[in-house]
């Protein structure tokens, strides 16, 4: 390695560190992390709340009830928080921003920590405001469907989160001029579709923090890897592949139209 | 207190009074109040109408039927009345505008009165156009679910209305330039989500006027505090906290990005 | 009456007649009427088709199935035909345009005739492409619910079509600058709401042509007045009242804000 | 035929060939075809996945579950891929672009081949990630409803795909200036409507590739003609008729308004 190359690399590292430090010390990061905390807290309160029913006297909410609740909530929370924190409310979205250079590593860690804390807080609130007769076994946890193996559920979580990140980074592609209407709403209906398409397979979670909150309350972590690895790998890959192969930037580079 | 300060305060009070009086004497306030009356009248006719079914020969409308009816109605009525009255049709929205300085105190009182009167009128109309076989016990009133305590329902109503106002004032934040598509539609799907998420808990009312109309017809006010205090406190807080901590204005003040 | 006044009236009548004649002789009216024919033909094929199920082996489609089909179809057909005919596909919309001066009397009559013919054609097509086992009694006709009187159903049809026209003319008010996103979509979700809110009362028809097609096939006209008078009176009034009291034009005239 | 005419025709053929060859040799066509492959692969994984349930322990997903999944997926995938391949993901859409001159013949063949391959791949993936207890007879294939003849199903598929293409080319008509909001979303809700309106008749497929994937896995092609001929003929006609009779271009030509 020549001295110039070494020097350039050193410069780059320096600028990497400076970027990280600047972000870490900004007041903005704190407010954004707090927003992520609030967002996931509400997401868990809403998502778990929507599934509650009285064991003997009630009727189980339908798949349409749950899927539309989940997707429309995401549309709303992104629209609400996008100018504060970006409205990720999901580590599998944050990892997409990380791998495409949209956020610093420090911000990624802050966001994920606050998202997980928010999920635990939300699970606590929903436990308190609902009667114990509605706390079914595995209360609040999304699990693989009947006869579905852990590996099958893992693959399902991976591919729905792959499409979630792939599509989202396509919508946010700054080189596109054809986007019209509300982008968070289209992300929201993608979430609806993801829940419907894996309803009896993995349950359509695609958000490790959302499922981790209930798991902490139950102290039951045997399926944790499925709902962490699936979304994180799928989501990270989806964002990366869109960015490198299909983004307007990458198409210009390779001379496509 | 120095004389200057006293003088400034006096000036401010004077301008407060002048603003109130000017608003009171405008023809516009009357038309706007009438629009709020009409809006809530339809809201109750529609909301209560959607839940009706024949006790013995019919099928109970599903949660999806009710939730989508409620949310899409809100999207429509806001779009319809926004240039006339703002399309609040809900005291818990009006209180949000009051605490953030969007409307005068006089207007707040006028709106709430006309909203309540509209709810009573709407309840009367729907009673007349539907057969008595469809008038179940508690006909038209939203009540806490099985085993849900009043305090639990109060907290649920508070937090869903907190998010309603918080999100709405984020959407209306004049410092944001990233909003695209129909804002009333996003508010409407938030209402859908609110109904779904507390369907078996508080029933997802978030509008004190809407529930008060049926209560007046039944002369049954024992749960009235739940559906007045929950939305008014939650909604007021949501609007206030967004305005002071997360609005683009407040972020500029504290030097955030 | 003074001679000047008589002369002015004569001039006005002349210009009224000229306007009518010009419209009558335009090729555009023919194409527009044909588009209205096609639109209502599809509306009936779709609306009646959505409700079909096998009497003994099938399941009756839910209210959500029917309501969303109806409303989303309206959103689509308005978006498709708006530059051709305006995409009324409903005499109760056409009457709104008539009373607010949006279309000529000749065009109104042409549209309504072609809409009714389209409904009959559509009913014929759907009869042919579906097995007789799916042709329930009253196949395709919307009727009042159990125990609902004709007068009650008439009032329901009147008020949902009142809001349909009232809201639509508010959305189309050229003095408004706050509309964003797709207007036909908001009209579509209003139709969803109308169907949900009168599902067990009048059935949520709001379109005289749509219900007249099936009635012609059955030659059963005893409820015809309910589904003609309700929407035509309600719709006409809704458009008129918005135009005269709440439109931006009327507000400017009376000095409101 | 005069020599000039012959010469002109020769010129035209030459330019036709050149256009075809240029498209064939572009790197862009490869990437676009790959995008179509991915799009249909996901479409089949999602569409078939949404319908899965445990034969004895599960509940069959409702028509609302399936219809919204299908339509919202289309809205999402068009928004995602429109800058890459146009996001057809359906031979019946590609044929519309072919007959209106939007794509070359070479591109049409590439797209259809990759769409069919994508459907087979998607069917393979969903077979692997789901338990065999969920693989009902005819697993993944859309078939005519009870008592519905093949010809009836063929007509249904033809007219829903007719409207799909007719409406889509109206939305994309470059002479229109009244379109607002997300066009892919309106296409998506049209797909929802198409599924609802033929739910118990042809099943609402409107995509030959989507149904061919599962047929290949089962090696059961007896209904293949229904789901190939219906959408291809209907879709092609819909695009053609809009383009020649109702497009803004055709209206200008004939002197309409």
Image (spheres, coloured by chain):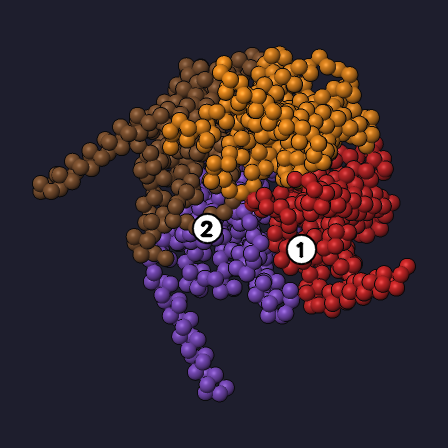
Chain colours: A brown, B orange, C red, D purple
Residues indicated by labels 2 and 1 sit on the same polypeptide chain: no
Front one among C59 and B190: B190
Secondary-structure class at tag 1: loop
Which residue is pictured at 51% across the width and 34% down the height? B173
Say whether residue A159 is left or right of residue D233. Answer: left
Residue C137 visible in this rendered orientation of the protein: no
Q: Are marks 2 and 1 in contact (CB under 8 Å)?
A: no
Tell me, for residue A178, which label it has, or none: 2
Which residue is pictured at 85% across the width and 46% down the height? C225
Front one among D173 and C23: C23
Going by the picture, which residue comes out furthest to the front? B3
State the separation of the CA atoms marked 2 and 1: 26 Å
The spot of residue C63 in percent (x, y) is 68, 36
Local packing at callout 1 (Cα closer than 10 Å; few below 14, some 14-19, many 20+) is some
The spot of residue A12 in percent (x, y) is 20, 37
Number of dots carrying numbers: 2
**Where is mark 1, residue-wise?**
C86
Quadrant in which the C terminus of chain B appears: top left
Residue B21 visible in this rendered orientation of the protein: yes
Q: Quadrant of residue B57?
A: top right
On screen, residue C180 above or below B40: below
Say whether residue C29 is left or right of residue A46. Answer: right
Q: Chain of mark 1?
A: C
Q: Quadrant of residue C21?
A: bottom right
The spot of residue A75 in percent (x, y) is 50, 35
Q: Chain of mark 2?
A: A
Which residue is pictured at 48% across the width and 83% down the height? D5
Local packing at callout 2 (Cα closer than 10 Å; few below 14, some 14-19, many 20+) is few
Which residue is pictured at 35% across the width and 33% down the height? A95
Say whether residue A166 is left or right of residue A131. Answer: left
Secondary-structure class at tag 2: loop
């Amino acid at each position: 390695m020549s001295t110039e190359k070494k020097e350039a690399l050193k410069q780059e590292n320096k600028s990497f560190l400076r970027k990280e430090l600047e972000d870490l010390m900004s007041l903005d990061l704190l407010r954004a992390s707090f927003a992520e905390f609030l967002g996931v807290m509400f997401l868990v309160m809403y998502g778990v709340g929507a599934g509650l029913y009285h064991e003997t006297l009630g009727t189980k909410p339908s798949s349409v009830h749950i899927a539309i609740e989940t997707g429309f909530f995401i549309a709303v929370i992104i629209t609400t928080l996008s100018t504060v924190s970006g409205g990720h409310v999901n580590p599998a979205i944050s990892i997409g921003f990380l791998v495409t250079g949209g956020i610093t590593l420090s911000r990624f860690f802050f966001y994920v920590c606050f998202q997980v804390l928010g999920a635990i807080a939300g699970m606590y609130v929903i436990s308190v405001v609902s009667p114990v007769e509605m706390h079914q076994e595995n209360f609040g946890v999304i699990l693989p469907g009947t006869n579905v193996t852990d590996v099958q559920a893992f693959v399902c979580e991976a591919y729905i989160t792959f499409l979630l990140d792939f599509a989202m980074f396509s919508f946010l592609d700054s080189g596109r001029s054809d986007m019209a209407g509300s982008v968070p709403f289209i992300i929201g209906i993608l979430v609806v579709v993801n829940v419907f398409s894996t309803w009896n397979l993995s349950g359509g979670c695609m958000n490790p923090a959302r499922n981790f909150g209930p798991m902490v309350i139950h102290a039951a972590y045997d399926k944790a890897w499925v709902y962490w690895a699936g979304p994180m790998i799928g989501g990270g890959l989806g964002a990366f592949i869109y960015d490198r192969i299909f983004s307007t930037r990458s198409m210009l580079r390779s001379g496509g139209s």
